[in-house]
Amino acid sequence: MAGQQDKEAAKQAKKEKRAASKARRGQLFEAFKMQRKEDKALIPWMLGSLLVVAGVVFGIGFILNAQWVLLPLGIVLGALVAMIIFGRRVQRTVYAKADGQPGAAAWALENMRGRWKVTPTVAATTQLDAVHRVLGGPGVILVAEGAPHRVKTLLAQEKKRVSRLVGDTPIYEVVIGSGEGETSLKKLQSHLMKLPRNLKPGQVDALEAKLAALGNRGAAMPKGPMPAGAKMRNVQRTLRRR
């Protein structure tokens, strides 16, 4: 009886796995169709990378008198490079569309990789300016988006509020934009990754518990800049699984 149940469970697990794989392929295909309509250089870039990588590996194999053995490896590596190019071009397109829209910074922060603890919209105005709080190895990072003349005041107020609880923990300020001293949306993650690592994971957890009492203040913000943001997140997850 137990053996039969195990077989049924294994059969169901395989069925669910096939369904999930089919769904991921569908997501990739839909993302490819959408990107191809907006990015005329997508197919040439993907095809070119496939041919170049496969050609290089084939050439190495030719020198070693093993070109036909290495050709399949070259094709696989070329396809992998093509998928990486596809993912980056999709990401670039989505970030370009999201840039400047209310909630874009919060969306970008919540889609970051790594051990980041993001609390969106800890402070906001009725004009949809907002400050988001990020905790990580660098310490506390306050990310502001909105009109520059308003977010600077909002940022200063939030920094004062946070500094009362965190003591000597470093507090970094980031303003999203294209002006002097500002960080563009597409470079936000890389900017955060370049900050010095001042805290260990345990210290970050303790800091999160301490700041949880602050709560949020101000107007509610949209959860994302556009519906495509959710699609981008699905595509990123799918590409990482591949």
Image: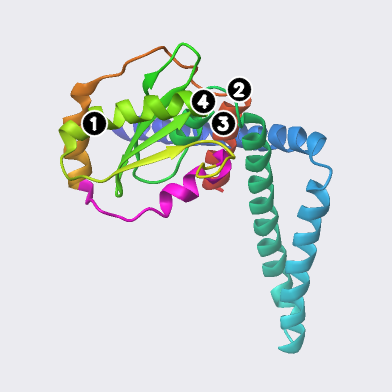
> In terms of secondary structure, where does tag 1 sit?
helix
- Mark sitting earlier along the chain (1/3): 3
Q: Position of residue 228 (x, y in %)?
A: 63, 26
For label 1, the residue is 162
Left or right of 14 on screen, residue 6 = left
Which residue is label 4 attached to?
146
Nearer the observer, disc 2 or disc 4? 4
Can you identify the residue that label 3 sits on? 19
Q: Position of residue 175 (x, y in %)?
A: 47, 36
- Under mark 1, the amino acid is Val
| Depth order, front residue of 37/15 | 37
At a point 56% along the width and 48% down the height, the residue shown is: 242
Q: Determine the residue located farthest toward the bottom in the rendered image.
A: 64
Q: CA distance from mark 4 to mark 1?
A: 20 Å
Upstream in the sequence, badge 2 or badge 4?
4
User: What residue does disc 2 label?
Assistant: 226
Examine the image and state in which quarter residue 229 appears: top right
Residue at horizontal 42%, vertical 51%? Answer: 193
Magenta region, residue range:
184-201
Label 4, label 3: how many angstroms apart (C-alpha)?
A: 42 Å
Name the amino acid, label 4. Answer: Gly
Q: Secondary structure at mark 3?
A: helix
Q: Residue at x 16, y 32 (%)?
A: 165
Q: Please tell me whether residue 5 belongs to the stretch shown in magenta.
A: no
Q: Counting other residues with Cα less than 10 Å from the Cα at mark 3, is it few (<14), some (14-19), or many (20 or more)?
A: few
